[in-house]
Amino acid sequence: MDKFNVLTGAAAPLNMANVDTDKIIPARFLKTIKRTGLGKDLFSNLRYNEDGSEKPEFVLNQPKYRKAEILVAGENFGCGSSREHAPWALLDFGIRCVIAPSFADIFHGNCFKNGILPVVLPADACEQLMADAALGTNARLTVDLDRQVVVRPDGQEIHFEVDAFRKHCLLNGLDDIGLTLEHVVAIDTYEKNEPAWMPVIAGV
Amino acid sequence: MAASRTLFDKIWDAHVVDRMGDGTCVLYIDRHLVHEVTSPQAFEGLRLAGRKVRRVDATIAVVDHNIPTEDRRSGINEPESKLQIETLEKNVADFGVPYFPVLDDRQGIVHVIGPEQGISLPGMTIVCGDSHTSTHGAMGALAFGIGTSEVEHVLATQTLLQKPALNMLVRVDGAVGPGVTAKDIILAVIGEIGTAGGNGHVIEYAGEAIRALDMAGRMTVCNMSIEAGARAGLIAPDDVTFAYIKGRPYAPQGDDFAKAVDYWRTLPSDDGAHYDKIVVLDAASIIPQVSWGTSPEAVVPITGVVPDPASEADEAKRAQMQRMLDYMGLTAGQKLAGTKVDVVFIGSCTNSRIEDLRAAAAVAAGKHVADGVRALVVPGSGLIKKQAEVEGLDKIFLDAGFEWREAGCSMCLGMNPDKLTPGQRCASTSNRNFEGRQGPGGRTHLVSPAMAAAAAVTGVLTDVRELA
């Protein structure tokens, strides 16, 4: 996983609430056995017409947002399925940070596993950033994870909260499995103490 | 330790392997269900790191999302689906993971077969790379969906790094009226609390109307917890649960079963246990539900009308409602009952159990699918299909003009050949009505199995209570 420290880039405004994972990446694109290559299918139903041509009005099709690295969105972003293809598609497109008033739990966790920072801010702050994002590439935002601030184009800083453990992992690009395996003795002990009636799945 | 704990607290506490300074826990996972869509990258990660599956005897794999629901003996045609299924088959062989093959009677939707085989048990922690893992909460287990990175994490360590969720109680008091089902209860709950109402929480369902449900109904309720934003839903295990489990292939047998029941009886929430949020619904006031929009919270009683965006004060919400109406091809004020449907889908991890098929067959018996309507019945597992055939339900459906299919996720999610075409309107027993969920441009109305069957035989959304 790539580290995340300070990101400065164009922010795209996606002013919709409840952007679900089927919107982010429809199920028909989940047949891949790889993590990469999903960027072209990101927001497919919103982004393309049935004949495959682009819908020019969709935000990521507009020239000033085609290289956006930050997405500013409405509440409950990422609701629906657990598909990690949603953050993979965002990442493959080039988006490293999503700012919204709230996120669905599974999507929120999946972002951290993939080097994407989900930033939760109050609705009024998101509205300000949405307005900043609407200015296009002249209005770049900076997201500083270490200092936990979003810096607006005028230099104003907005503080955000982030779970300390997740911040640590993201800043250092740490692999969760490696961290967990430091607890392997405790896991061994736990397994030894399982009740005798606990069945196993065998003989399938 | 606090004197009074909830069901969630008890399961959580019993599975904490280690606790870090900031409250993050290493949580032990008792059961890991694996399917073809969210696992290939996880197995690949294990290979790259030279890791093995820590507990193959706590892991079970099956294919469900991709597979066609027509005869599969001649193989899978669609190349990408075929590759994903073959990849799972190679992975389970390489890593030694137990697997129910495509042509095995035990194959089916992952959230149907877990309880059916006695793999999902009370008090367990159960995960799967699928958000509808919440279904298994009906057993009195803590069951939640995870992403592929966490699938790899569980395969490698049999644990997850987690912080405890908040406790939410949804109590449904009293008894439901005739024609009102578990599906109507959960749709009404989601309508009440909204699609983000359960974010950060685990929902425990309680009250007389929940206790009165059979296990299939409880699974329907817990299944859609994620549609309310909660990662997990729970129902305290009771004698109904234990009777359901007894004798299932992978459940404890003999003396072990008795010992397990002794433990399971300690799990229900203590009197006075603390809930962070409590919601109470009156069962008698619940009318069969139907969704009108592209979010599961957009539901009304079948006796109701499509709401008017003009009545919504919030500008963003008003715009969202209008977008939903445009997508759904509906007009504000329009009655839901009488709206013509093109397709009826009875199936999915929400409503494909034998009890669901019986309820639909009871409505369809002696009637015929309306002209111009295509209706599919897709059992949740090969064993349910067999049971239905023993009971003659297949004949009822076929005589009535329904298609009778093989087990799989089918038209719930547009990943296999069963899809809506743009503009088609579907009465569906599945769980999500998102834009394009059942196929690009498809329009979904979420309903119960009885309501879906009623729509099939009348050709329009219908109040099943009025159908003679």
Image (cartoon, coloured by chain):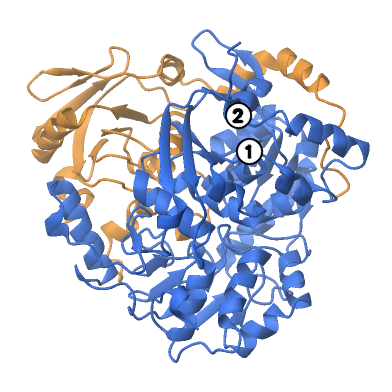
Determine which residue is flagged by label 2.
B269
Same chain check for tags 1 and 2: yes
Q: Secondary structure at mark 1?
A: loop
Q: Colour of chain B?
A: blue
Q: CA distance from mark 1 to mark 2?
A: 8 Å
Res. A40 visible in picture: yes
Residue furthest to the bottom in view is B371
Is B344 drawn above or below residue A65 in the view shown? below
Determine which residue is flagged by label 1.
B236
Position of residue A137 measured from the top left corner of the image (x, y, whole percent): 13, 37
Label 1 neighbour load within 10 Å: few <14, some 14-19, many 20+ = many
Q: Is residue B356 left or right of residue B93?
A: left
Position of residue B353 measured from the top left corner of the image (x, y, whole percent): 65, 63
Marks 1 and 2, the one that precedes in the sequence = 1
Is B134 drawn above or below residue B299 in the view shown? above
Q: Colour of chain A?
A: orange
- Chain holding disc 2: B
Please name the amino acid that badge 1 sits on.
Ala
- Chain holding disc 1: B
Please name the amino acid that badge 2 sits on.
Ser
Position of residue A134 measured from the top left corner of the image (x, y, whole percent): 11, 40
Q: Would you say the residues marked 1 and 2 are in contact, meaning their CB atoms lie under 8 Å apart?
A: yes
